[in-house]
Amino acid sequence: MDSWILPLILIVPVITLLAILFIPKNNDETIKNITIFGSAISGILSLYVFMAFAQTRDPNQFDFSMVWLRNLSIRLDFGVDGISALMVLLVGIVYLTGTLISCKITERIKEFFILYILLIIGVYGVFISQDLFFFFFFYELAVVPMYLLIAVWGHSSEFETFNRTKEYGALKLMLVLVASSILIWIGILSTFVVANQNSFLFKDLIDANIGNDFQIFIFPFFLIGFGVLAGLWPFHTWSPDGHVAAPTSVSMVHAGILMKLGAYGILRSIEFLPAGAQEWMWLLLILGTINVVYGALSAMAQKDLKYVIGYSSVSHMGYVLMGLATLNVIGVAGSVLQMFSHGIMTALFFALVGVIYERTHSRDIETLDGLIKPMGIAGTLFVIAGLTSLGLPGLSGFVAELFIFIGVFQTNPLMAILGVIGAAITAVYILRLIARIFFGTVSEKWANLPDISKFELIPSVILAFFIVFMGVLPIYFIDAVNESVKELINAYLSNFVAG
């Protein structure tokens, strides 16, 4: 039975999408209800995958394999380890909560949910694929719908010195990500030919004993290609602009899941290109550290609430990249935990920014004040997200950043010190943001704002629950991830030494 769980995780959203296709366009409530039901089933399946793996820690428990193209040995090969099981849980949580937030969409609802579900199918596929060809196929499937979701349902913004149209944000995102995908595709085809295994399976590429010179040459294609989607500096500017233009639920998926695909791609590339990783990880560590400090300083300088969270995401993804660059168990484990923590936290941030904007029609930090009085529940949830962002003990961000800092200190103390400085800057702008928007005297025009609604509260509470749960009981997540990280690093060390 368990061998069909991972295909079922893809089949459920496919069935949901097909059901929506046959519903008349004007039947909005039915479309929304079917999408909510489908996302709830997917969320339950995702939770089951993670909990079942956490109990057994058997990487073969959910294996599924089916030949798709025999001549090139391309297979629908699905499986999870502790790393991908946690990412599957992340997708399930953000999918369900993003769907509930999407119920506020009023225009072209059918088309919106079709594209939204296509995106979700793509991200699920990336995290469960054990074949590099389908890994890239699902990767592209996750990226392409973003253009239309932003260009059609997004929002244009006018600022004092410049304008940002939704079409600009969508096009910039698409052009940058397509360019980065070209690098990845070159890397995949080159690796397939040089490995000479007539297989795209990760395990076959790992066993191929690819020459060190080729690994060193080709690894930057994967590093930069995947790094762009992870918000790697200096290729990050598409991300904040995309956040500002995107509708709320799409921002949740963008920051909560899509940026994790890039980091996950780098992580998996280490497995079959260990010598290349060893040669180039110094660069990732430096760029990741720049991400942390530059992103935090940029967030502190913003006046638009979405830009603050957008640049904050760039900064926090820097911690993920720093952890990966350590190539030690504690650093990489922290990176994986940070991917989950940041995904949940930033989804909550963007959900609440949407709540605030819908009521005030403003994201200007200088005009928003005292919102904790009319919007006490929303304000409390925003504070939880903010304290997670600055790494408060007892919330999910603390243990993830702690692991990363320890791992980086073991590798490069100078970069670790700069990372800690970035965390201090984060505390400054987050506390200042919370104080400015929620506390102090409330303006008359905000005094009678309605608080968070039911369809906004449920997803926000779900996200806040996982933030607190991971913060209070981190061992449950650490134990699930740690064994897989150890196996990955041990395989990296043995293959690197053998190479």
Image (cartoon, grey):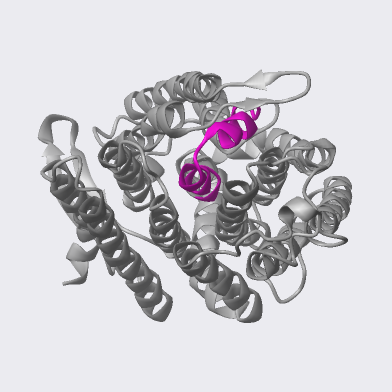
Instruction: Find residue 199 and report its horizontal and vertical position in percent.
Output: 26, 36
Does the rendering let one see residue 203?
A: yes
Residue 126 sits inside the magenta stretch = no
Q: Residue at x 40, y 33 (%)?
A: 149
Residue 38 left/right relative to 283: left
Q: Where 371 sits versus 288, above or below?
A: below
Residue placed most toward the observer, 377 or 298: 377
Which corner quadrant of the image does residue 373 belong to?
bottom right
Residue 315 left/right relative to 50: right
Q: Residue at x 25, y 48 (%)?
A: 28
Instruction: Find residue 496 and report its horizontal and vertical position in percent.
Output: 55, 44
Residue placed most toward the observer, 348 or 231: 348
Question: Magenta-highlighted stretch: main secondary structure?
Answer: helix
Residue placed most toward the observer, 193 or 45: 45
Q: Where 170 sits versus 210, above or below?
A: above
Report the number of numbered marks.
Answer: 0
Q: Residue at x 26, y 63 (%)?
A: 37
Magenta residues?
236-256
Q: Locate the N terminus and report the quarter of the image it occupies.
A: bottom left
Instruction: Find residue 404 and report its horizontal and vertical position in percent.
Output: 72, 58
Residue 133 left/right relative to 359: left
Residue 240 sits inside the magenta stretch = yes
Does the rendering let one see residue 130?
A: no
Q: Where 123 sits versus 405, above or below?
A: above
Instruction: Find residue 469 and report its horizontal and vertical position in percent.
Output: 58, 77
